[in-house]
Amino acid sequence: MTDNQNAAATCLDETRFDVMVIGAGIAGAESALKLGDMGYKVLLVEKEPSIGGKMILLSKVFPTLDCAACITTPKVSETARHPNITIHTLTEVETIHRNGDRHFSVQLKKKPRYVVEKDCTGCQECEAVCPVITKDQFQFNLTARKAVYIPFNIANPRIALIDIDNCMLCGACEKACPSGCIDFTQKEQQLQITAKSIIVATGFKLFDPISIERYGYGRYKNVITSMQMERELAPTRPFNNVLRPSDGKIPDKIAYVFCTGSRDHTVGNPICSQVCCMYSTKQAQLLMGALPMADISLYYINIRAFGKGYNEFYLQAKDMGANYVKGKIGKITEKENGNLILRFEDIATGKVTEREHDLVVLSVGLLANPAIVKAFKDEKLELDAINYVQQPNMLQSPAQTSIEGVFVAGTATGPMDIPDTIMSAGAAATETSSYLTRLS
Amino acid sequence: MEKKERTIDIIKQERKVSAEVLEERKIYSRNRKAIMEVLKEGPKTIPQVAAETKLSLPDTTYFMMVLFKFGDIVVESLDDMDEYYFYELKKK
């Protein structure tokens, strides 16, 4: 038995929890922290190699322009070190059965990391010698990573893992590792646990604009998504500055296309994503800081600046020089030099107009992430009409779901911004605590 | 210290490396070598490197950004038009 298997066997003894939180994004981490602080024993399950979800990858947050990592990393660190919280990364929930009135039996599948977690120091010596490069999904494919890698600089746990499907099996990493923690004998593990209650914090999926052919995403190199721009603006960015992916040019004229894949029946997502107007406005402000000579145009249907300080934030962007144009883009075409022609109806003049930009950012919407439903075997976790987790008692008890003892937090219920996500996670923790008190 | 058994030899008995992974590795090595060779002459912009290596512009951008990420090349300065950065080999 390897060290890692020994460690796992020790973990196997820890099979009884008060709460299992599914998803370790900012909602899951917040719920886990609140419940851990109340003294409950919490299991946090995350399918990715790092906790922190999508927020840990953001550049800054609106409307305060605080550094996202500066908010997320202390919370993530606190979660990781909390004595009442056990974390399983690279782990998926396979099945959930109700076991009598008081418990859920849960089967988990833990993928191998091929690195002994407790021995890895995060020194990246393995990464330096790895000869393979493959697309870096944490930089949204703007650059590459090695087959053995630490997902991103502020990943937690900051432990390497091996992408075995892209590994050349050369063994260079194992040879170079100073602590000898590479272990290719690791296998997938099935873990069985019980929990008295469950919080679903599985978050959202980003809309993939490849399905809107007229925007040319995937075909035109200089059409990127808002998440790719987010990475270009982040301190841990893939390039040395904001650059066009086609030729490394510093862009002069940047366009944002709002409501890409939201408020659009034709792509099956009729609802407003709530955050796209504001994150685009935030990026416009950051771009005006990074590239003072650049013109930023934002093409919109309506501006939805509903939150505290949001309208002022939008007005601030306008005052800084952001050019808001009311009109939805009909089509994007590419010129030989990589520039892009945007065709749209300018609502102010009523005329169909064309404008040239050298970089286009698609402000993509948010989609439901309903895969967890399949794990519930005895009872059905009801979804609403657009596949978010149904809240049967939304006004009085927003964290309740159709299953007693199962609660929901954050964007698993619908699109929302970070302050609302934190509040929703707090509500889920409170309702879970109340349920556990009644149970005992 | 006791010599540890290399676990890579064990997994090699169970898994084979896919042809795509080997091909991608070849492409990376070839392009890396070509770019590094061109940059030996001095700092160059991405379009200049693309013109000399005959790689497409997007491929040149991608591979140069990979070399930048892994510390093989560094940013030198901006060109006169403030459009493109010059990149040079990292002095080791």
Image (spheres, rainbow, N blue to C red):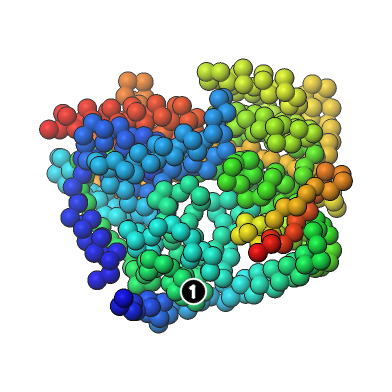
Tell me where residue A198 sits by quadrant. top left
Question: In the visual, does B26 lie left or right of B8?
Answer: right
Disc 1: which chain? A
Q: What x and y, as percent, mark residue A126? A: 48, 66
Residue at disc 1, secondary structure: helix
Is A165 drawn above or below residue A194 in the view shown? Answer: below
Tell me where residue A406 sits by quadrant. top left
Quarter of the picture holding the N terminus of chain A: bottom left
Q: Residue at point 45% right, 37% down? A: A72
Question: In the visual, does A378 lie left or right of A93?
Answer: left
The residue that mark 1 highlights is A172
Tell me where residue A396 sits by quadrant. top left
**Mark 1 Cα shell of 10 Å, populated few (<14), some (14-19), many (≥20):** some
Q: Residue at point 55% right, 54% down? A: A137
Is B68 drawn above or below residue A315 in the view shown? Answer: below
Q: Is residue A277 visible?
A: yes
Q: What x and y, as percent, mark residue A44? A: 32, 45
Q: Is residue A219 visible?
A: no
Q: Residue at point 26% right, 32% down? A: A37
In the image, A152 versus B20, the foreground residue is A152
Q: Residue at point 64% right, 53% down? A: A142
Disc 1 marks a residue whose amino acid type is Ala
Q: What x and y, as percent, mark residue A248? A: 75, 51
In the image, A176 versus B66, the foreground residue is A176
Specify the farthest residue to the left: A440
So how many labels did they put on this image? 1
Is A28 drawn above or below residue A124 in the view shown? Answer: above
Question: In the visual, does B81 lie left or right of A227?
Answer: right
Quarter of the picture holding the C terminus of chain A: top left
Q: What x and y, as percent, mark residue A280? A: 64, 32
